[in-house]
Structures are given as structure tokens and as C-alpha cells.
Image: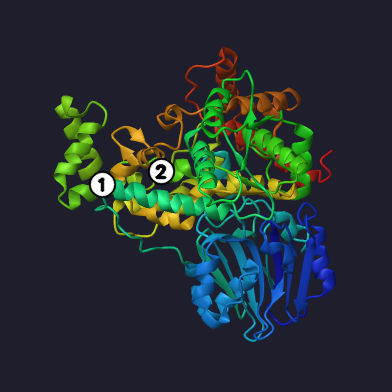
Amino acid sequence: MSGIAGLVFVGGRPVTADMLDRLAAATPHLGIDGVGRWHDGPAGFVRFALHTTPEATTEAQPHADRASGAVILFDGRLDNRDALREALGPADPGAAAPDCVIVLAAHGRFGDELPQRLVGDYALAIWQPGTRRLFAARSPVGMRPFLWTRQDGFFAFASEPSTLIRGLGLPKRLNEGALGEHLAARFVTDTETLWDGIYRLPPGHALCVDDGRVRSWCWNAGPFADHMDLSESEHVEQFRTLFDQALIATTRSERPVAAQLSGGLDSSAVVCRIDQLVRDGRIGAMVEAVSARYPGEICDEGEWIAEVEAQCGIRSTMVEGAPFDAMKAATWCAQTLHLPLRPNTAGTVESVCRHLNDRGLRVGLTGEGGDDWLAGSRAHWPDLFRRGRWGGLASEAGAAGAGWGRPVRATRAILAGAVGPLLSRSRRERLLRPHLDFSQDTPPWLSADWARRIDLADRWADAPRPPALGSFSQTQRYRVYSLARRHINMDNVFSYAASRGIEFRHPFHDLRLTRFLMGAAGDMLRRGDSKKYLLREAMRDVLPERIRQRTDKANISAPIIDAVTQRLEKRPFRDMHGVRNGWVDAAVLEQIQAEHLVWRGAGGGAPPMSAYAAVWNMVATDMWLEYAFENERGE
């Protein structure tokens, strides 16, 4: 991730170099490859460069088109360069053109329909001086943030909160409603941030500022093709084709590429299939596998990693997950105004970034997205019933759980899972938005009075709904494009990586692949009680058979428990801001912490059912409030 920022004065006041310098100075952790500035009249742009593709090394951003005067900021990677260049015809800027130049040319041709033509991971902004209009857009699975604010007389945007708050001298005001969602571990807002007055453009959305008015819309609302009638072999063939395409696209780099290897199904599929593509001459060089491990811990994946090493004839570089460092976390909050990184993520990300820096690498592939897109559900059961495919429905019910060996249970499953959502609004809502808790009851660790004051139940009730698509299954799957918790959990991770000169890429989130999966037959994703059926079938003769059939996942909560324990030694729950402000009940969090400490001490077994995310969210929020608001030096 590079970074972008911009300022537009609505009344025509000119942007000055000093203004842009302040935006840049407020973002010192970005711009590994320099900071570019442009301003003309009421508009000014800043770009924090991180070069990760061959073409990026020659680009200069912000980039202005000589003919039209339009100026672009492009934070991202364009994965369909050839197709887009062909669509441009005579306006094609050439094979060596940087991504930003191709995208700006495409905007000149397609206007606001531009995002429908792009494949990749990006956030972009284009200024049209003739009409004094700003256009911005984000890719559907938004890994590149776009934050914005509309203040008296101007509109501003940035990748980072510190750019807006410090660079513009905005007051630090807390958005208690969004904070309540976070502390409740039910974050649903798709446009708000923890900062009052600072918003985010959701993934798959576009925005324009015209005559001072801000308008946004979803450009990725479908329709999506329905592949229910494809055979199993056709599903597998199509998935393989699109997965290969995604791997080839995400390995485009001006330096060698690394890939995180955990031993799980998703990351192993990335490494093993790339190995085959290298052998076939379709990818130029093998990725360097990097495995962040916790030797001796229950979350260590060493035995599974060894399976991949033997299959591919490689040796993965082991880096130990770094222990939580409270002072580093405090400094991070103070410098960037981000939440601290979740310890189980921070430990691996810090170690991987350090290793890639030592090796001079800048790109790391992940298995992120495999769980989201491929695990499947039974949301297609109402579709089968509605289309009269009762034989297929009966067959699937027979393959799930006890099946037709217990006919009463199987019949009830069909009535609840297939008929219920057609007749009952509440069942329909639960089916289409399974990531939400529809009880809307205040969690026991939150103050009921505070929850009422910030209208928490109403916020949950008004949680964004997916667009009405052609089927139950597509409507439910669409949630992956816009999961709000991805913003609250991952923006700080990608910002941290960028601050170390590293860009993480995610083949499973490739737009062409995800659009296919939006329409895949439900039993190709979940067959009986087996999740990721399509991936497992597509990875025959690719993955080690033991990993291909693996159904468990490592529990990686131990580093979080250790970090919380460390923090509590210096600052017990009763002294934290959330408790002192009357937002959170310390006794409930203490009980949850005690239960998890017992599990941690036992060294394994089934973890407690209590919501440990609430404990970490309280600790993280306390650090954020202390250092981002009160002590900006992180002391």
C-alpha cells in the first residue's frame, strides 16, 4: 500500500504548497519511495510512494494528463492491464505505461463507469479542473482505505487518519456510536470511523464532489452470473483457471515475491499452485515461503508446513512470532492514530515484514479471503426449494449431519433452512446476514445505559443490507465484499506493512475469481458438512493430500491472552478509560479473562465460549484513547 491525500476548496480558494506540506508531515510513516505533490487552483494532491510493480518505478504521481488537464492519484495495483489497454484502442498509452496512466486514460474514455472496467486492489481519486469535479473509487474488497471529511469550505481525503486530523488541524472528537460497536465486538457501520466527522468510502463504492456536494454510490451491486447449472467438473475447471489468473496477477512485482505459509488449506494452496505454475513456465520464479511460527505453542503449524515443503521441494523460512511490545504499540497509536495491531496478527506481521526487509523484498502473498469466499453455507437451500429442485435439496439434506438416517431431523432441517427463510422475515435476515447478532441485546460487559445513550440497538438494526440480488445465496455471499469488521481489524495492519515498505496481496480476493464464486452452486462450496469443497477438488494433485483433507485450524488466541495479561499487570480493567467512563463493566471482562487464562494454562482443549474479542477490544481501545488522544509521543 502506498498512500494518497487530497484537498479541494469548494469556494475556489487556492491550495498552497504549505498546505500540502502539512498533510505530508502528518504522515511520516508512509512514503518509502518519496512523496509527490501537485496543486493548481482549488485542488491539491499528495502521494506517498511505495513501488512494487515494474511499471511503478518509472511513474510520477500525482499524474496529470496533458490534453485534458485531469490529475490522478492511484494507490493500488491494476490486474487487467492488457484488457484495459485493448479497450482503450487508439488512446492506449502503451505496454510500459504505469497503472495510473492507463487508469486515467480509461477514465477519459469511460467516465464514472471506470470502476466497472478495473480489476485489482485500489483506491483512486481524479480531479477534473475544467468542471472542478473530484471523482473517487475503491475496489470491491477494499484493502486500500479512503477516508474523507467535509468541513466548512473544503473537502479532504486521505489513506490515513493522521493525515486528515493533524494535517488539517481538525479537533480530535470521538465517535461514541462507532466505538460502542467496536467494544461490543459487533462492528457494522460501513461509512463511519472511530473519529467523529471522518468517514470512509466503503469498498466497491464511488464518490464525487461537485459544487461542494458529496455524493456516493455502490458501483459493484451486480448483477452476478448464476452458475448453478454448471457441472462439478466445469466448476473445478473454471476455478482453476481463475485462481491461476489471480496468482499470476498478484506475483507481478519489480522484485522477487514472498508468500506467507501457515500450513492451512488456503496459504498452502497459494504456495503449491505457484510452484506448479513456475514449473509450467507461467510464473517466472518461485516465491519465497515465509512461515511465522510459535514453536512449542498450540498454535504452531510446523508439522503442516513440513508437508508443503516436501511437496514443493522448498525450504520455508521460519520467523518466530514477535511477542507483544506495549511500548511499540503505544508509539504506533501515537504516531498514526490507528488502533494497536491485534497481538496474534502483530507478532507475525512484524516478523514477516522484518524478514522481507532484510531480504530486500516488498511483496508478500497471503491466503486471506479463502475462509470468506470458499467455506460455503446453506443459504442456497431456499433457492433450491423455490426453483423446484427438491431432489437436490433432499440429497443435500441427506449428506448433512445425521442425514436421512434420522428422517425427522432431516425434514426439520429442510423446513428450517429452505422453507423458513421464504416465509419468515427474521429467518431470512439471519440467513442473509449470518455475521450479525440479531438479538440486539446489549452484551453483558457493556453498560446498558451507555448503549441506550448512543442508540446502539438502532445502529445494529440499521446495519447496511446487501443489494437485492438474484438469489438467497448471492445476497448472502455479497457480505464478503463489504464486511465492516475488515476495516476495524485490518486497516492498521496494512498501514503497518506499508510503513515498513511491504505490500500484502490476496489472490483469493481477485475480482474475477470472486465474481465467479458469487454465482457458484452452493453444494460446490459446502458439500454436506465439508467446507471448501470446490477448493479441495481443484487442489487435487496440487496440495499434499493430508492438507487437502484438513478440516481443523490452529487456534491463535494465545498471543492475545499473553498480551492482555501483560497489559493488565500495569493497568487493570478498573483503571481503563472505558470502565472509568462507565462504558464497560470491569467484572465481566475479568471473568472472561480468567476463563481464558485457565484454558491457556491447560495448553489446549476446547477454548471457552465467552467472547474474548471484547477483552482485547477494551485493552486496544484503552491504549488508543491514552496515546492517540492524550500522549502523542507514546511515552
Would you say 404 lies left or right of 196 here? left
Q: Is residue 577 visible?
A: no
- Mark 2 sits on what residue? 374
Between 352 and 573, which is closer to the camera in this rendering? 352
- Mark 1 sits on what residue? 421
Quadrant containing the N terminus is: bottom right
Q: Are marks 2 and 1 in contact (CB under 8 Å)?
A: no
Q: Is residue 252 visible?
A: yes
Q: Residue 104, relative to residue 631: is it above or below?
A: below
Q: Residue 113 location, x and y as percent?
A: 49, 74
**Helix or strand or loop: what does disc 2 sit on?**
helix
Between 352 and 567, which is closer to the camera in this rendering? 352
Residue at (54% x, 41% y) in the render: 275
Q: Residue 330 location, x and y as percent?
A: 77, 39
Between 379 and 525, which is closer to the camera in this rendering? 525
Q: Badge 1 local density, few (<14 within 10 Å), some, or many (20+)?
A: many
**First-in-chain label (2 vs 1):** 2
Which three-letter amino acid code belongs to the residue tagged 2? Answer: Leu
Residue at (73% x, 62% y) in the render: 57
